[in-house]
Structure formats: C-alpha cells, structure tokens
Amino acid sequence: MKKYLYVVPLALVFCLTIACQDKAAMAELEKFKAQAAAEQQNMALVTKVFDELNKKNTEVYQELYAPDYGWHFPSNNPKGLTREEEKGFSKMLWAGFPDMRYDLKEMVARGDKVMVRFVSGGTHTGEYQGLPPTGKKVEASGMWIGQVTDGKIVNAKEDFDVLGWMQQLGMELKPIAAKKK
C-alpha cells in the first residue's frame, strides 16, 4: 500500500509535466502560425504594389505606403526618397518606357521584411533622363527589400542594375584619361 502512495503522486507529477509541455508547445506553434500568416499578408501586399505599378497606378503610393515612407535607391542612400518623390520617379520612368513592367522572380518574407528579386524592362520610346528615345528594348534585374508595418510599406531598399540598363540604351562606360605629367 505504501508503494502506491509514492507511485500515484509521481504519476500525477509526470502527467502534469507532459500537459504543461504540450501547452507550451501549442503556444509556440500558435506563435509560429501567427508569424507565418503575417508574413503571407506582407507578401500579398508587396505583390499588390508591384501589380499596381505594372498598371501605372500612382494611387498605390497613397494607398499602400506609409506617410513617412522612405525609398533608399541605391540601398545605401542614407536619405530615402519620399513616396511623392518615388511617385515622380515612376512617372519619369513610364514616360521613357511606356510598356515598363516588373516581373517578380522570387519573394521571401521574414518578420516585417519582404525581399523581392525582380526583372524589369520596357521599350525606350520616350525621353528618359535627358536621353532621346532609342526604340531599344531593355531589361535588367534588381533586389528590393521592403519593411511592412500595420499593413503599409514604411521603407524600402533597392539595388538595380542601372549600369546594365544604361549600356543597353547605348551608353558607354569609359575610363577617365590619365593625367599627363
């Protein structure tokens, strides 16, 4: 009989330990599910942004970007452009390349960040940064990392193959001539 007095409390402690571990595991699982759902929402938001830019919808900047948004292009630019400045850049780009498109190749989300690898291109039929139309089709790739807070993009860092883009338009990169002594 005394043996049972020792076994029963031990069995209860064992059952409670397992139950507590299951609750902790379930709480951890719920946390991961919530994070995965938030990351999926962020990726859907970013996909919508690029879809709207492909439609040349400038309202996307007011609708899906935070008022204090900053676009760091190139990504090491310490002062990001405002959403209005990026809107102006997009209009200038579309004027030079009316058929401009973004093709999303890869997208990964982690926490509040979404990373996109994209290819963009178009036909140079309008003036672009002082360069008269060439009629050339160009294409280059880039990387974009956006931060999402409360369903709005709050900042983005982008790197794009501008050199390759400009070379396709006929621009040449020449070394600086050495100074004569």
Image (cartoon, rainbow, N blue to C red):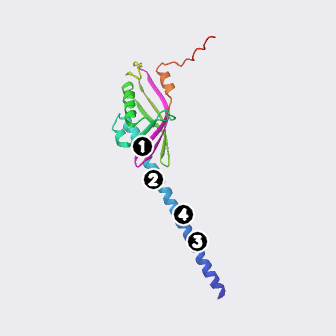
Q: Secondary structure at mark 4?
A: helix
What amino acid does circle 1 point to?
Answer: Ile
Name the residue rendered at 36%, 26% in the picture. Answer: 95
- In the picture of the structure, the residue carrying the numbered disc 2 is 37
| Residue drawn at point x = 46 percent, y = 39 percent | 156
Question: Residue 165 at what x, y percent from top left?
Answer: 48, 25
Pointer 3 and pointer 1: residues touching (CB < 8 Å)?
no
Crowdedness near tag 2: few (<14), some (14–19) or many (≥20) residues, C-alpha within 10 Å: few
Q: Residues within 10 Å of mark 1 (few under 14, many from 20)?
A: many
Residue type at mark 4 is Ala
Residues at marks 1 and 4 touching, judged by CB atoms closer than 8 Å: no
Disc 1, SS: strand
Where is mark 1, residue-wise?
153
Where does the N terminus fall, quadrant-wise? bottom right
Magenta extent: 135-158
Residue 167: % across, % down? 50, 21
**Nearer-N-terminus badge (1/4):** 4
- Quadrant the C terminus occupies: top right
Q: Decide: marks 4, 2 in contact (CB < 8 A)?
A: no
In the picture of the structure, the residue carrying the numbered disc 3 is 17
Residue 121, magenta (yes or no): no
Marking on residue 25:
4
Q: CA distance from mark 3 to mark 1?
A: 44 Å
Label 1 – label 4 distance at C-alpha: 33 Å
What is the spatial separation of the Cα atoms under label 3 and label 4, in whole angstroms? 12 Å
